[in-house]
Image (cartoon, rainbow, N blue to C red):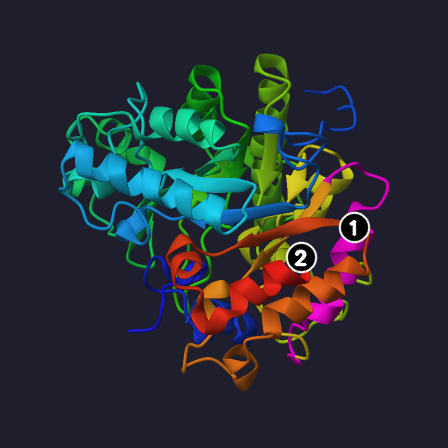
């Protein structure tokens, strides 16, 4: 079975559903916000006296036990040992940050008053694992001079569609009207204001209670399209969609509200905590919008996920952006070499930091094109990115591959800069 990709976490996201480039990736207040602060370790000295360096991040995925814990049901001591080993791995690989998935599917890797304990810990959603993974991760990452970015998925509820299979007391069990079944999965409905308030507060609980360096979101907003299916938010659109040109515009506004309101709340609560998003790597295509990138025949976050990632940068709602540029240099539909300058131009004069999401999981995978069989592909990404001063570093998906270093590609990329 090929490595699970960012959009391969949950079933149903395929080449046919979202276009060839997405399929290849599948096989991250009303007043003007001031220029965002630097993220700690990648700014000047950072924690533990770390000298100034480019951001180098490692995603640690917990959904389906991809990276951590290695399987559900380990003892608290075994889970803690695995987590510490991953942090030690990050140090050995010269990372400056770990991006730990702490809210994978409307559940939590900390004792949240909003949502149940994550199923990945014990195998049973809602069962107390006997320790606090997020609290431990923060303390131990900082002790090693690493940033800890708390990675949350805003709207995914479950990789299966039946609310009855959620933990007793789960918010969707109490409010089934909050959820939409789509593509064999379950999602919070972004069109409901009460849902937006709830998921924002659930994620901000981690900001409030822990000394995290950043709140980090991935690429799931409205779900990736599934051929022949409709995301049923017609009633919410009827109630709240007045004044919008169409449902797509209303959906984008719903996501814009979540982003802007969360940004304002973080700055009011803990201004030093950064807010970052790792969107799908293509905003729009130039053939659709003159402001778009020189890409084609692929998905686009603006049109398919209703995620206007370019606007979030231009409005300075986010402090950093990590587009998932999970394609190789020269790929005709989504060329890494064309997307990097597009994103560099997008962040210009905004103060928003740009880090590039890298598909380490593709390296050496026989199902991937020839470029990914070349141990120098990611090193070439680093070389290319250095020609764009706006690029502040790279983030690698994911911890399992960081450990394996397929074909020595990560070692080569780090040596490159």
Q: Which residue is mark 2?
A: 283
Which quadrant of the figure has residue 96? top right
Q: Residue at x 70, y 47 (%)?
A: 354
Q: Residue at x 47, y 38 (%)?
A: 190
Relative image position of residue 409 (x, y in whole percent) = 53, 69
Q: Earlier in the sequence, mark 2 or mark 1?
A: 2
Residue 292 can be seen in this image: no
> Which residues lie in the magenta part?
331-352
Relative image position of residue 66 (x, y in whole percent) = 31, 54
Which quadrant of the figure has residue 333? bottom right
Q: Residue at x 28, y 22 (%)?
A: 111
Relative image position of residue 182 (x, y in whole percent) = 34, 54
Q: Residues within 10 Å of mark 2 (few under 14, many from 20)?
A: many
Disc 1 secondary structure class = helix
Q: Is residue 11 magenta?
A: no
Residue 139, above or below 328: above
**CB contact under 8 Å: marks 2 and 1:** yes
Q: Which residue is mark 1?
A: 346
């Amino acid at each position: 079975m090929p490595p699970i990709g960012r959009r391969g976490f949950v079933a149903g996201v395929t080449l046919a559903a979202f276009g060839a480039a997405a399929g290849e990736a599948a096989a991250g207040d009303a007043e003007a916000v001031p220029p965002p602060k630097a993220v700690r370790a990648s700014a000047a000295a950072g924690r533990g006296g770390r000298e100034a360096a480019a951001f180098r991040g490692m995603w640690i995925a917990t959904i389906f036990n991809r990276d951590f814990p290695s399987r559900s049901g380990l003892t608290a001591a075994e889970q803690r040992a695995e987590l510490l080993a991953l942090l030690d791995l990050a140090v050995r690989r010269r990372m400056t940050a770990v991006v730990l998935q702490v809210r994978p599917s409307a559940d939590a890797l900390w004792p949240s008053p909003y949502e149940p304990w994550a199923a990945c810990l014990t195998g049973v959603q809602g069962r107390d694992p006997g320790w606090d993974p997020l609290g431990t991760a923060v303390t131990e990452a900082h002790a090693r001079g690493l940033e800890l970015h708390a990675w949350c998925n805003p709207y995914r509820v479950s990789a299966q569609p039946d609310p009855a299979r959620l933990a007793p007391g789960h918010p969707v069990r109490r409010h089934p009207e909050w959820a939409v079944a789509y593509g064999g999965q379950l999602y919070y409905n972004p069109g409901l204001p009460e849902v937006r308030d709830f998921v924002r507060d659930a994620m901000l609980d981690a900001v409030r209670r822990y000394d995290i360096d950043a709140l980090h979101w991935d690429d799931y907003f409205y779900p990736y399209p599934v051929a022949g299916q409709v995301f049923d938010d017609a009633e919410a659109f009827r109630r709240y969609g007045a004044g919008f040109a169409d449902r797509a515009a209303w959906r984008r506004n719903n996501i814009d509200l979540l982003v802007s309101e969360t940004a304002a709340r973080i700055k009011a609560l803990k201004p030093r905590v950064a807010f970052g998003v790792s969107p799908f790597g293509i905003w729009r295509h130039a053939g659709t919008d003159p402001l778009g990138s020189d890409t084609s025949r692929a998905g686009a976050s603006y049109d398919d996920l209703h995620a206007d990632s370019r606007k979030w940068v231009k409005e300075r709602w986010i402090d950093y952006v990590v587009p998932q540029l999970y394609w190789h240099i020269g790929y005709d539909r989504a060329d890494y070499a064309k997307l990097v300058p597009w994103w560099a131009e997008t962040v210009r004069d905004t103060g928003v930091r740009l880090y590039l999401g890298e598909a380490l999981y593709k390296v050496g995978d026989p199902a991937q094109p020839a470029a990914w069989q070349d141990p120098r592909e990611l090193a070439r990404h680093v070389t290319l990115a250095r020609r764009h001063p706006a690029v502040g570093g790279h983030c690698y998906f994911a911890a399992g591959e960081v450990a394996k270093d397929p074909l020595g590609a990560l070692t080569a990329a780090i040596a490159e800069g």
